Amino acid sequence: MDSLNPDHPPLIVTPATPGVWKFWGTALWGLLIFIAMFVGQIGAILLLAALRGLPIDIASIQLVGREPQALALSVIMGLPATLVAVWVAIRFKRASFVDYLALHWPSWKQLLLGAVGLIVIVLAWEVVSRSLGREATPGFMTDLLKSGRDNDAALMLLFAFSVAAPMSEEVLARGFLFRGWSASFLRVPGAIMLSSLVWTAVHLQYDLYFLAEVFSIGVWFGYMRHRANSLWLTIVLHALNNLTAVVLTMWLGS
């Protein structure tokens, strides 16, 4: 038998090692994932417009999209679209979805460190805002959240901005993009900076001042993602940040 013949050792099949998308693969897939997120969000608006018998055009999208309930549903529907696109990208590399995105629960010490750092950054920007006489929250977001509170959309907006949005954005930025770019020539520092820039670009509805704040928070999230090797950590931090902002604006803001 060949298995007993030293001249003909048995064939050993070594399973393929799960791969990682590097710089360009991550960039191209990241663009597709962002498009999927956008399609999921705009699809929700189009569906609402169609159900109301409105024509499917830009005017209808703008009309429906200004409503708090519609905007909340749009943000929520971006999450499953993002998750599916990311799953497909990772599947092509035959990698584990959980391991690729570092979906590991952090320690309480790491969670505490991340929260303290986030509080320091937010308070620092609060001090700067007050010294410059600026609003601590963009005016249009204040109007949206208070309108949602007054039109029975508070809980829907709370879920959209405190659960759906953090998960979608973190899976894309600190999950997929950071994972691939940190394994490329960018290494960890470059991946933190570039993924933070991409995350900041997702918030182009803000002015340059608020974009700078978003970028600084993104760098901290990226550092904690690397330090703790946990995407759940940044999802929780992101959710806590948004939850605090939404609650304060809806019910405690003057």
Image (tube, rainbow, N blue to C red):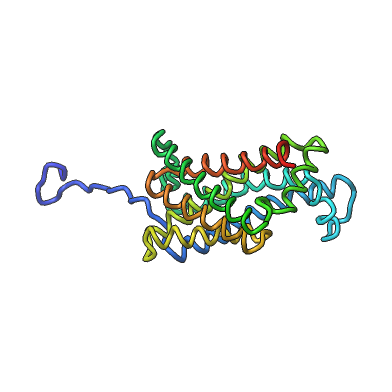
Q: Nearer the viewer, residue 40 or 140?
A: 140
Residue at 77%, 42% in the rendered image: 146
Q: Left or right of 152: which side holds 218?
A: left
Q: Position of residue 239 (x, y in %)?
A: 57, 41
Residue at 73%, 39% in the rendered image: 250
- Residue 215, by quadrant, is bottom right
Q: Nearer the viewer, residue 46 or 232?
A: 232
Q: Position of residue 154 (x, y in %)?
A: 74, 36
Residue at 57%, 46% in the rendered image: 83
Q: Left or right of 54: which side holds 168?
A: left
Q: Position of residue 213 (x, y in %)?
A: 57, 56
Q: Nearer the viewer, residue 1 or 6?
A: 6
Q: Nearer the viewer, residue 47 or 2?
A: 47
Residue at 74%, 44% in the rendered image: 145
Q: Left or right of 152: which side holds 81?
A: left
Q: Position of residue 183 (x, y in %)?
A: 37, 58
The residue most toward the left is 6
| Placement of 204 over or under 247, stated as above or below | below
Quarter of the figure with the N terminus: top left
How many numbered circles are shown?
0
Quarter of the figure with the C terminus: top right
The residue most toward the right is 53
| Placement of 132 over or under 226, stated as above or below | below
